[in-house]
Each structure stands twice: as C-alpha cells, then as structure tokens.
C-alpha cells in the first residue's frame, strides 16, 4: 500500500538523518575502545549502517512511487507528440532499464568479490544486455509491475548499503575488480551508491509522467505545470539531505 506524500514526515526524517552520523561516530569511538569485545555499542554501530538505507527506502516507497498528475490542468497548447514523444519514451526506457540492471549487477558483483571470488562473474554481452533492457522495459510499462520493481530496487539498495558498510568496517578496499569501481569519480562509495539511486529516481519520475494513465495510448503528452513537479522537487529536497548525511558520515 502506498501512503500519500506527507511533507512533515519527510522534513522530520531529513533532520533526524542530520543528527544520526554524529551519533554513529560516538558509537564508533566506543566500539573501537572495546574493539576485541562484543558490546552493545559494537552491535549498535554495526546495525546503524542499515538505519539510513531503511529510512530512505521507506520514504521513497511511500512518497515517490505512485505519482499522480492532474491531466485536466495540463490541457494547453504546449504538447509533445509524434517523433519527439517517441524519442523521449525510448530514451527514458533505455536509460532507466539499463541503470536498474546495472544497479542489480553491482550488488551481485559485490557479493561475488566478497564471498565467491574463485568463481568468475562475466558481464553480459551486448546482445544479452539488449534483451535484458527490453525485458525490464516491458515491466516498466505496467504500473503494477513498475511498483513491484521499485520495491526490488530498494531491497537491492539496502543490501548494497549493508555490504558497503561491512567493507568499510573491515577495511576492505574497493578496487578495479569491483563493477562499481567504474563509477569512481571520487573515493566515496556511499555517495556513488546514492547518486546512482537518485538517477534511477529521476528517470522513474519522468517515466511515471510519460506513462501516466492514457498518455501513451493517446500518444500525446501535455507539458507539466508547476503543481505536477511538486513531488519531483520534494524528492530532490529529500535526497539533498541524504547526500549531506553520507558526506558527514564518511
């Protein structure tokens, strides 16, 4: 069940996440003080690595999944149809499907490098990748399956975040053997993880608008008004605080 967007809840969560990294650092100091012993603080510090990913997932699934747009308000002369609409739809589907697949592949690759290093994990060929993109795109066309897919994306996000947290605690360095290494513009893997998720969220929003109700069957899109973009700006506001959280934490 998707809960309606509540700005107050988003703001509360954002401010909580600004405080959390300082609490985690205190738990880390206490954990390092009793490094050789299992203590309450060591357990809290290990578990704290999934607090933020869980809150991000819960907030996004409740607020940034089932978008609604007012079609009547958008009845204006500013429309997109024909070849321009085909280009937008195709481009959006291809990029969104590719990012979703690559995000799942990043998770499999991390698990492979951590626990099954002897087994060789091959990247898909161009033909296989095209088939996978087509397969994911077919799920994105259906609103029901699109919501299920987003839930899987955030389950994947929680797992990736946990493995990254585990590697950081155990001083496991990410090198060029990891698939996520190709995204390295700077040595901050948590931020890379978040930026990939933000890219998926932005493309998911644009696809939700393009495929809203009868837009594709009518093959005409009305230019969105400011009211339709309100959820998008709320999403950016929320993830801005997430970026701050991981910038403070690392």
Image (tube, grey):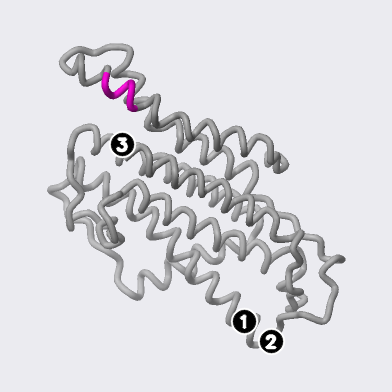
Q: CA distance from mark 1 to mark 2?
A: 6 Å
Nearer the camera: disc 1 or disc 3: 3
Drawn side of residue 25 relative to residue 232, left or right: left
Q: Position of residue 129 (x, y in %)?
A: 37, 69
Residue labelled with disc 1: 86
Q: What residue lies at 54% left-to-right and 56% top-to-bottom?
A: 201
| Predominant SS along the magenta part | helix
Q: Mark 2 Cα within 10 Å, few/some/many (few <14, many 20+)?
A: few
Task: Look at the image and tell me in which quarter the C terminus lies.
Answer: top left
Q: Position of residue 178 (x, y in %)?
A: 22, 54
Kindly state the secondary structure of the residue where label 2 is placed: helix
Nearer the camera: disc 3 or disc 2: 3
Residue labelled with disc 3: 165
Question: Magenta region: which residues?
Answer: 25-29
Q: Nearer the viewer, residue 133 or 230?
A: 230
Whether residue 16 is situated above or below residue 80 in the rendered picture? above
Drawn side of residue 62 relative to residue 93, left or right: right
Q: Position of residue 140 (x, y in %)?
A: 58, 61
Q: What residue lies at 74% left-to-right and 63% top-to-bottom?
A: 226
Drawn side of residue 73 relative to residue 113, left or right: right
Tell me, yes or no, whether the two marked residues, 1 and 3, touch with CB atoms within 8 Å: no
Residue labelled with disc 2: 82
Q: Nearer the viewer, residue 110 or 55?
A: 55
Kindly state the secondary structure of the residue where label 3 is placed: helix
């Amino acid at each position: 069940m998707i809960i309606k967007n509540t700005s107050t809840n988003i703001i509360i969560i954002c401010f909580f996440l600004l405080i959390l990294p300082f609490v985690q650092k205190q738990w880390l100091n206490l954990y390092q003080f009793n490094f050789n012993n299992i203590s309450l603080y060591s357990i809290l510090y290990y578990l704290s690595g999934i607090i933020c990913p869980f809150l991000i997932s819960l907030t996004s699934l409740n607020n940034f999944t089932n978008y609604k747009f007012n079609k009547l308000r958008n009845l204006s002369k500013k429309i997109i149809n024909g070849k321009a609409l085909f280009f937008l739809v195709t481009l959006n589907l291809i990029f969104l499907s590719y990012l979703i697949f690559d995000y799942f592949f990043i998770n499999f690759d991390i698990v492979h490098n951590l626990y099954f290093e002897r087994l060789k994990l091959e990247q898909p060929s161009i033909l296989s990748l095209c088939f996978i993109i087509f397969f994911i795109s077919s799920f994105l066309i259906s609103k029901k399956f699109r919501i299920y897919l987003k839930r899987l994306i955030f389950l994947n996000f929680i797992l990736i975040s946990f493995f990254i947290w585990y590697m950081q605690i155990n001083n496991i360095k990410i090198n060029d053997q990891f698939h996520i290494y190709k995204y390295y513009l700077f040595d901050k893997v948590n931020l890379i993880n978040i930026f990939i998720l933000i890219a998926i969220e932005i493309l998911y929003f644009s696809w939700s608008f393009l495929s809203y109700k009868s837009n594709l069957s009518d093959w005409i899109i009305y230019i969105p008004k400011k009211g339709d973009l309100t959820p998008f700006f709320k999403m950016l506001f929320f993830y801005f605080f997430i970026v701050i959280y991981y910038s403070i934490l690392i």
